[in-house]
Amino acid sequence: MNASWKIGTIAGIGVYIHWTFLILLGWVGLIHYTSGDDLGDTLHGILFIFALFGIVVLHELGHAMAARRYGIATRDITLLPIGGVARLERMPEEPKQELVVALAGPAVNVALAVLCVAAIFVLAGLSNAFPALQSGLDDLGFVVEDHKRLPHLSELPLIGVEFLSKMLFVNVVLVVFNMIPAFPMDGGRVLRAILAMRMDYVRATQVAATIGQGIAILFGFVGLFYNPFLVFIALFVWMGAASESSLAQIKAGLQGIPVAQAMLTNFETLSPDDRLSRVAEHIIAGSQHDFPVQEQGSVVGMLTKTDLLKLLAEVGSDEVVGNVMRREFESAEPSDMLESILLKMQSSGCGSLPVVRGSQLVGMITMENVGEYLALRSAMRRPPSPPQA
């Protein structure tokens, strides 16, 4: 969250806005300015962007509330120029649960679209009744100044109809786009959930990913001739499908394996009194990037390489670890399953976790050594090559 700012909390979920969102607002303002629009039109365009991202927040809240129903918490919602991201602590394990969570977001947009249609009909009716009221005010000589009369009341419903029509269009587009059966859109997860009801989860993911990549190729081909933006969407879909398929295979390979089999047992630790310069020396001398901080035999913090690089520039190498370490961190136990720990590392944004038994530090588990463990395990299972003649 270093590149994002918290703008509020909804239903106990922190809502953040990424700094790149400011670039989008500036771009919208620049377009209006270069088009010769006045300040009012420019502000209207910027307010429309805020309304659009309000809809995105509600969409992501739909996912979050559905996940909460199954005991899955949402860490936060972040607004990006390309949409929103709700970080769930984990994905539902049951296909029916994943189906409900995936559909919850588009369902919010469908509900908002229905409300927009109803409001448009109401305002359209009011626009027919307001001219008579405006005429009565004119007859009474209702004047603000001698040279400036009030805006016609009949224009107010029409302004509302125009705005609601845009919101209706936005919600319809979000439903259609998100229901494309390709990762990372909601439609890809819906397809995977439906397939997983009839086949193995990994196989269902691979089939859904293949379909998604086929759609990406189609988008890319059409985009080359008609709309370059489709090429960007095609790349986005292709990478999302590949990532989801790879993650499913990794999770399947880690099932039933305890942390004790893959954890590091040869590693360096820090004390709160160590200076950052000593941490830098450890990183240069070895391959370890993240360090548990111990005090009186207990783990009291974590210091990552990413944090260190930032801190060296901000506070200098003489600062002590205890003043800058992460005091809130996740940990693992030797008996925990690697599959759940991998999800914990991904959701926490930290690629390393201390492994503790009781209060005693017994190891470290990192994304790198999990990958190495899988590679070695796969190689040992592979049959030896036949001797060459």
Image (cartoon, grey):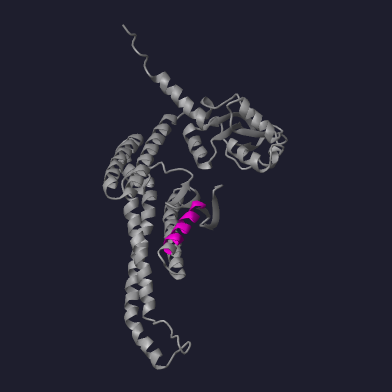
Query: 171 left or right of 143?
Result: left
Q: Quadrant of residue 93?
A: top left
Q: Quadrant of residue 282?
A: top right
Above or below residue 377? Residue 338 is below
Q: Can residue 366 be seen in this view?
A: yes
- Say whether residue 81 is magenta: no
Query: At which x and y percent is residue 216?
Result: 31, 42
> In the orientation shown, which residue stands out farthest toward the top?
389
Q: Quadrant of residue 214?
A: top left
Query: 129 left or right of 290?
Result: left
Residue at the image position 69 percent from the left and 37 percent from the top: 317
Query: 158 left or right of 362?
Result: left
Viewport quadrant of the C terminus:
top left
Above or below residue 178? Residue 287 is above
Query: At which x and y percent is residue 31?
Result: 42, 60
- Say whether residue 24 is magenta: yes
Query: 100 left or right of 338?
Result: left
Instruction: Determine the main secondary structure of the stretch shown in magenta.
Output: helix
Q: Nearer the viewer, residue 130 or 348?
A: 130
Q: Is residue 325 visible?
A: no
Query: At which x and y percent is residue 10?
Result: 51, 58
Q: Nearer the viewer, residue 7 or 149?
A: 149
> In the orientation shown, which residue stands out farthest toward the bottom?
140
Q: How many labels does the image show?
A: 0
Q: Which of 153 and 365 is in front in this view?
A: 153
Residue at the image position 42 percent from the left and 32 percent from the top: 250
Query: At which x and y percent is residue 188?
Result: 34, 45
Please provide the residue range marked out in magenta: 18-32
